[in-house]
Amino acid sequence: MIIQVIAAFFATLFFSIIFNISKNQLLYCGINGAIGWLVYLLTINMDSIIFSTFLGALTISIIAHILSKIRKAPVTIYLIAGIIPLVPGAILYKAIYNIVIQDYDMSTYYGIQAIELACAIAVAVFLVASVTKSPRMRK
């Protein structure tokens, strides 16, 4: 588990570099991604992969909003980079691979699972964004 969290930290950090995030924000982006992945790992055995992804994305989104207030930077800096470990890339690969080998049942299974995970991430981000919206913007 520790190795996976460290790997999530570095994956988030390196994607932050690719996204041209400033050097003084890189560490915070990496920590955000690592914490989100840790929440995912801690909850994966409790229920479903979709719920675990939702909780991980919810945690990342909350931390991103807190960091944006503290560091006076846009939320997207921390949010987009932090979500990277939760993106269902391997599942999308399996869906496309099964299309190529003409196993359409498995392709449909993996495709639906990828869509469910993407929706879980989107709902978590939207939920936190709507709750943390400033009172001035609500009017």
Image (tube, grey):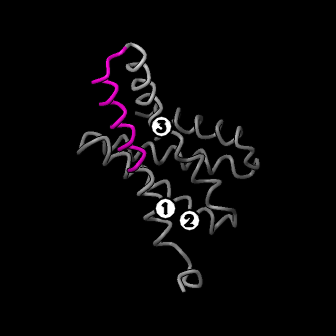
User: How many residues crowd around disc 3 within 10 Å: few (fewer than 14), some, or many (20 or more)?
Assistant: many
Q: Name the residue under label 1.
A: 62
Q: In this view, does 25 lie above or below 136?
A: above
Q: Nearer the viewer, residue 91 or 8?
A: 91
Q: Which residue is drawn at 74% across and 51% down?
A: 24
Report the residue at 42% width, 57% height from top.
Answer: 124
* Figure check: 6 above or below 106: below
Q: Do the residues labelled 1 and 2 touch (CB within 8 Å)?
A: yes
Indicate left or right for 123 with 8 as reference: left
Q: What element carries label 3?
A: helix
Judge depth for marks 1 and 3 and give the one in front: 1
Reply yes or no: does residue 71 show up in magenta.
no
* Residue 97 horizontal/vertical position (percent): 42, 19
- Of callouts 1 and 3, which one flags the residue occurring earlier in the amino acid sequence? 3
Residue located 48% across and 32% down the image: 89
Q: x, y percentage for residue 128?
A: 46, 65
Q: Name the residue under label 3.
A: 5
> For the residues marked 2 and 3, what is the alpha-carbon distance in whole angstroms?
21 Å
Q: In which quarter of the image is the C terminus?
A: bottom right
**How packed is label 2: few (under 14 Cα within 10 Å), some, or many (20 or more)?**
some
Which contiguous range is marked in magenta? Answer: 102-119
Q: Name the residue under label 2.
A: 66
Q: Distance between the residues labelled 1 and 2?
A: 6 Å
Label 1 – label 3 distance at C-alpha: 18 Å
